[in-house]
Amino acid sequence: MLAKRIIPCLDIRDGQTVKGVNFVNIVNVGDPVELGKFYAEQGADELVFLDITATHEGRKTFVELVKRIAQNLDIPFTVGGGISEIRDAEALLAAGADKISINSSAVRNPNLIDDLVRNFGSQFVVVAIDAREANNHWTVTVNGGRIPTDKELYSWAKEAEDRGAGEILFTSMNHDGTKNGFANKELAKLSEILTIPLIASGGAGSMEHFADVFTLGKADAGLAASIFHFREIAIPDLKHYLRTKDIVIR
Amino acid sequence: MNIVVIKYNAGNIRSVDFALQRIGISATITDDKDEIRNADRVIFPGVGEAATTMQFLKQHKLDTLICDLKQPVLGVCLGLQLMCSHSEEGDTTCLGIFPEKVKKFVPQAGDLSHCKIPHMGWNSLSELKNPLFEGLSEADYFYFVHSYYATTGADTAATCTYLNPFSAALQRDNFYATQFHPEKSGSAGSKLLSNFINLKF
């Protein structure tokens, strides 16, 4: 049976792991390679490394980091942040990344999805969508949730799939950081309309939330950051718990 | 021991090299025909599209070279598919080392939440029956990413089921292949790579 995936997400700035808590008070939670290896040994099924560095120098540091990650990790990993053209993706693929994730750049230029898929294949391209709900309408946002766009969650997710994306990573900005659980209703709806795998993000606060995201949310993978970085949930405990709930876990 | 990874226009050659380094093996990545012929072990990785990749292999005369190899050869992912007889992807005639055919996963109506394509993630195997799987069992998981699969038959060395049973691994004579990515499959994958390197041949 195909196992549900547990994916820790690491934010990287200038080659270091950071986790934004309410977008302020950024706390250093270690070296990305060491932390990545630690998670892999703990049983993480995949890792996501998001580069939140804005500078050109920082980008080069990140590509070097990706190479070190690829050398040291024996599980797949996705890298994202600042990918807006084929050249960016090419550098990351050459460094050893298994997949790239694009977000704001895909919203601004949807053809980027088609271009990346044509050059590197669907399996390499994850489209990340940050969306916020107001009055029963899910608006796609960019720049870390700060800027609303004219796109709507479900139609944009379907469009990304039609353009060839291999996976959708959906973050509910209403749930992100709350630790009250994932956006299961919306995830279940997405899972129903999509034929590609769906990664759920935003809201994980307890082990029950992961059970819910796989059963109620019908997600293929659950992603979280701070609860893992601050050791609030240990991955071996989480996997043991999910097995007791009859969820297929590696 | 001289381990060669065939260099061609595939995406994941570097990952295979890194995985070998992690188990203490330094491989040569090359498209030099003599180096490939003279290697003790040959790894044929692959991520990409079947038709264009087959075309590339033919243009560089790597197709006949691979088929004529006598030492243990390990095909990975698209490598496995290209070692079969035919692929539905681009209606491609493949190398024909294995008689199996490569077909596209077709989602079944009414079961949408369970049949995402590509088959992406960690899956377990059944009927593991090959020295490649020495020390590995049905309890181990391997990492898959693919939308096409090889049918099962006499050469099937391990079966995986996703929508339908398919060949997770194949073996005939000196040719071995896995649909999953051992280079990305944690300690189980490292074990399989070691088993391949250590095959008694």
Image (cartoon, coloured by chain):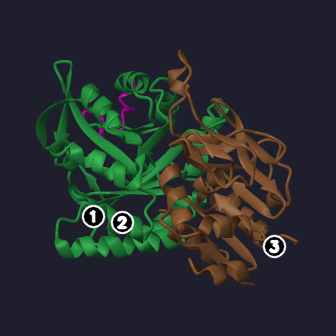
Q: Which residue is mark 2?
A: A92
Q: Amino acid at mark 1?
A: Asp
- Identify the colour of chain B in the image: brown
Location of the N terminus of chain A (image quadrant): top right
Q: Which residue is mark 1?
A: A88
Q: How many marks?
A: 3
Q: Which residues are magenta?
A: A173-184
Q: Which residue is mark 3?
A: B198
User: Which chain shows up in green?
Assistant: A
Q: Amino acid at mark 3?
A: Asn
Instruction: Report the predominant secondary structure element of the magenta stretch.
Output: loop
Distance from the alpha carbon under mark 3 to that under mark 1 = 39 Å
Q: Are marks 2 and 1 in contact (CB under 8 Å)?
A: yes
Image coordinates for residue A122, horizontal then vertical, percent: 41, 46
Location of the C terminus of chain A (image quadrant): top right
Image coordinates for residue B83, horizontal then vertical, percent: 67, 55
Distance from the alpha carbon under mark 2 to that under mark 3 = 32 Å
Picture layout, residue A141 above or below residue B26: above
Image coordinates for residue A181, horizontal then vertical, percent: 39, 32
Residue at x 74%, y 70% (from the top left corner):
B69
- Label 3 marks a residue whose chain is B
Looking at the image, residue B132 sits to the left or right of residue A36; the answer is: right
A179 drawn magenta: yes
Picture layout, residue B200 above or below residue A177: below
**Which quadrant of the view contains residue A82?**
bottom left
Q: Is residue B13 visible?
A: yes
Image coordinates for residue A218, horizontal then vertical, percent: 48, 27
Mark 1: few, some, or many residues within 10 Å (few <14, many ≥20)?
Answer: some
Q: Amino acid at mark 2?
A: Leu
* The residue positioned farthest toward the top in the image shown: B110
Mark 3: few, some, or many residues within 10 Å (few <14, many ≥20)?
Answer: few
Picture layout, residue B135 above or below residue B103: below
